[in-house]
Amino acid sequence: MNSIIAEIESILKQAFAESGYDESYGKVTISNRPDLCEYQCNGALAAAKRYHKAPFMIADDVLAKIQDNAAFSKVEVVKPGFINMNLSGVYLAEYLIRMAEADRFGAADLGQGKTIVIDYGGPNVAKPLHIGHLRPAIIGESIKRIKRFCGYNMIGDVHLGDWGYQMGLILESLKEQFPNLFEAETLEELGIDVSLLEKVYPEASARAKKEPEFAEKAHMATFKLQKKEEPYYSVWKKIIEISVRDLTGNYKKLDVSFELWNGESDAQDYIPPMVEDLKAKGLAYLSDGALVVDVKEETDKKEIPPCLIVKSDGAYLYATTDLATLVQREQDYHPEQVIYVVDKRQEMHFTQVFRTAKKAGIVPDSTQLTFVGFGTMNGKDGKPFKTRDGGVMRLEKLIGDTTNSIYERLTGVEFPEEEKRDIASKVALAAIKYGDLSNQASKDYIFDIDRFCEFEGNTGPYILYTMVRIKSILRKCGLADRVEEHGFKMNAAASDSEKALQLELTAFHDMMVQACQENAPHKVCQYLYEVSNAFNSFYHHNNILKEEDEQKKQGYLALIILTYRILKQGIELLGFDCPERM
Ligand code: ARG
């Protein structure tokens, strides 16, 4: 179905046309003066020049055509030529009934099944998943859900950092620590688990910087691995297995999941033919012994250096792997778009990769390559977030601590222990995710977990609290399990707060289009916050349960049920869930 603005706009367009003006002047927006009206059309002001007429005369012509339209309770022309409109209660209620009955509330099918690959997460094998990995996981997951809701076939790829020198460092270290590494059936029998692996990497990396001999050995191990030489390759596979198992568990706690668990290693076979092709096309050339592709463009405002494909020592680079991954993605999925949710400091890298890919025809011209760069998560001191002792915080610990702190706040009502735990973990996830997603992704933000956990204000727990409040009303009416199949009829609003809530719900369609097209979960957050505020104001102004007029009461229930369903859909798009009570 069309958004409510599109519907009003079509009425206005017709009125402009019937009055002899171009219909394009019938553009409608939500009023920027809600004290005066709900919607406005400023087209008469723009049309005045073209038709050499005073704006209010044009507006008056249009007014004559729409005055009696049943969609409006009030239309008026305000000097110099604004057309102000309020919707009629019946029209609004009917619109909401259509919304409630439609599949996905009648949201636009923007994707029509087209495929998008979204690359997010990007953890590195054998390095701990820490708080810095929160953003790509949370933002990527939400963009994926939003786009899927809007009709795209979404393929999320975790794109593991599982190749290169870091793996050589780990292999060489383990070989030293465990002389029978290559003979062992499993790594577990040697006592190698994920926490050991996570210790090995930073130690080895520090050591290699001091001991050239060790660094040399690690490079050799990397070299052997990259040729898939045994037993290096088999041991590497076992390391990946342990690491992936741990990562899967961690992402599960965040309610983040991937369709593909590919890694940098999966792209390696595509590299040699791709390099040959870049040479054959005359794009790649030698510069100081390295193979590079020029990517600068005339319109560039800053210097874009050439994309490095092969180093002078023959090693491949980060860009090489990303290009080869695009070759693979194009071959496997022929996607309409590839989205990368990565730290914004990597923007230059992606500019180089995207340009090379387009120049070389690795993806067709029509494929959109999109970089969604996210900002840094800072502590309250404005510096990158650190734990109290100055280290990076593990994701598991962050989730655990937050859950405990919410648990402590669940006072007042006596819940059974198991339920209390469940509530705490759901609310904690909402606090963490909403705290992040409510900021525009590209901005740095202050990770203030105390504020995120508050039950009031623009927070995840506040949204959940609102939903739980609705659930409790429904429970008292014996409707808790029948949110979808009640059969009540929405009423024409009888009060301002009721109408305000109804109008807020209709904004869903336009909000979804924007969130989808702009890869902007923060728009969903903002919307849920406004819906929650509108609901809470409605709730305070009307006594839903004690309403004696049965028809009125059923109208209220229809309204709060739709409110609940939309909030529920919204938090699902953000990637968290709501408890029954809290
Ligand atoms: N593993 C990388 C890192 O830690 C992020 C990967 C992002 N995705 C990509 N296709 N390069 O920086």
Image: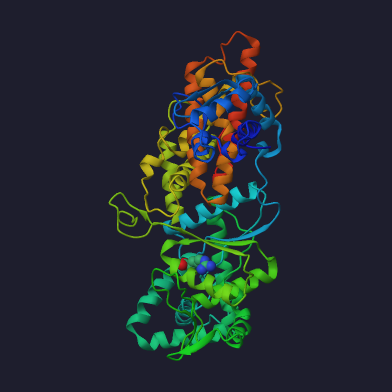
Q: Residue 273 versus residue 473: which sits nearer the camera?
A: 273
Instruction: Check the picture and name the quadrant holding the N terminus.
Output: top right
Q: Quadrant of residue 566?
A: top right
Q: Residue furthest bottom?
A: 289
Q: Position of residue 182 (x, y in %)?
A: 56, 82
Quarter occupied by residue 114: bottom right
For the question of whether residue 444 can be seen, the reply is yes
Q: Residue furthest top?
A: 548
Residue 22 or residue 520, whichever sits in front? 22
Q: What colouring style does the render use?
A: rainbow
Q: Seen in the image, is 150 located left or right of residue 355?
A: right
Spot occupied by residue 471 in the image (x, y as percentages of width and height):
58, 27
Residue 169 % position (x, y): 45, 79
Q: Is residue 301 left or right of residue 420?
A: left
Residue drawn at the location 33% of the way across and 57% of the way down:
384
Decide: is 577 above or below 198: above
Given residues 520 and 298, the one toward you in this image is 298
- For the point 45% across and 63% down, the residue is 128
Residue ranking furthest to the front = 52
Relative vertical location of residue 211 with respect to residue 351 in this rendering, above or below: below
Would you say 61 lies left or right of 172 here? right
> In this rendering, is residue 370 above or below 203?
above
Q: Is residue 582 visible?
A: no
> For the view shown, which residue lies furthest in the left direction?
381
Q: Quadrant of residue 556?
A: top right
- Judging depth in this view, the residue of 361 and 399 nearest the camera is 361
Q: Which x, y percent locates residue 137?
A: 51, 56
